[in-house]
Amino acid sequence: AQSVTQLDSQVPVFEEAPVELRCNYSSSVSVYLFWYVQYPNQGLQLLLKYLSGSTLVKGINGFEAEFNKSQTSFHLRKPSVHISDTAEYFCAVIAMRGGNKLTFGTGTQLKVEL
Amino acid sequence: KAGVTQTPRYLIKTRGQQVTLSCSPISGHRSVSWYQQTPGQGLQFLFEYFSETQRNKGNFPGRFSGRQFSNSRSEMNVSTLELGDSALYLCASSLVSENTEAFFGQGTRLTVV
């Protein structure tokens, strides 16, 4: 079984400041990792994914994440946030050869303030 | 290319009733998964269908069921609705059966009164 921990339920940050959203996972098998964003009353949109290769992954909207296998982490970063980044962010994993079943963290609400 | 379409967007039902939600995946996608999102439990996996067969199932009671048709469209059904079934139900489609990007619909907001 897999589990995902997002330690910060809310992260307030000023516009143009950098931000890091933390994600740790636990799994007895190898996994693929994802970050999704959800705007109010919307579905989920994929920001980025790690399947293999370089541990630094770049995604849409200027976001990037680094996979750290030894620390079982996949933290999301953006060097300069914008008001429009205000949303809820979910970290998720899929077990390799486990079909398409996503296990999600509890989410981090990013609030960007002027 | 059209995205994942879920109908209806909003639904209000009474306790004890049943409800059917529909999901049309992206054209060519053969895997459809369903998730329940609530403030208390977050995003929880319900089940996944691939080529009309249920491949994975989450830890939900038998009142929750689903099916997939030959054109990959999927429906989920909840019988004997309870207040706690109030949630946003999200459908996701994927191209194939293993570890590929999931594209989500906008969801169906179900309110049970």
Image: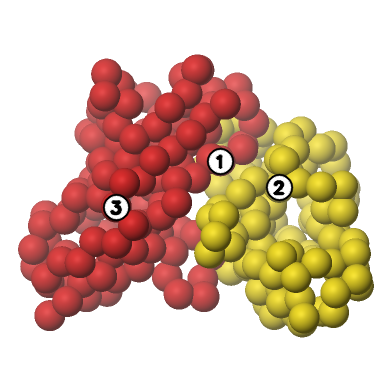
Chain colours: A red, B yellow
Amino acid type, residue under disc 1 in the picture: Leu
Label 1 crowd bin: few (<14), some (14–19), many (20+), radius 10 Å = many
Q: Is residue A81 left or right of residue B60?
A: left
Q: Give the number of the disc on residue A102.
A: 1
Residue B71 appears in the rendering: no
CB within 8 Å, label 3 to label 1: no
Q: Residue furthest left?
A: A17
Where is residue B56? Give x, y as percent: 73, 35
Q: Is residue B52 left or right of residue A51?
A: right
Is there one chain holding both mark 3 and mark 2? Answer: no
How far separated are the C-alphas under marks 3 and 1?
20 Å
CB within 8 Å, label 2 to label 1: no
Can you identify the residue that label 3 sits on? A8
Up the image or down, A33 lies above or below A83; here it is above
Quarter of the view holding residue A18: bottom left
Where is residue B8? Give x, y as percent: 74, 76
Amino acid type, residue under disc 3 in the picture: Asp
How far separated are the C-alphas under marks 3 and 2?
25 Å
For the point 84% across and 67% down, the residue is: B81
Quarter of the view holding residue B1: bottom right
Give the mark toward the camera: 3 or 1: 3
For the point 85% across and 79% down, the residue is: B14
The numbered mark, 3 or 1, whose residue comes first in the sequence reads 3
How far separated are the C-alphas under marks 2 and 1?
10 Å
Can you identify the residue that label 2 sits on? B46
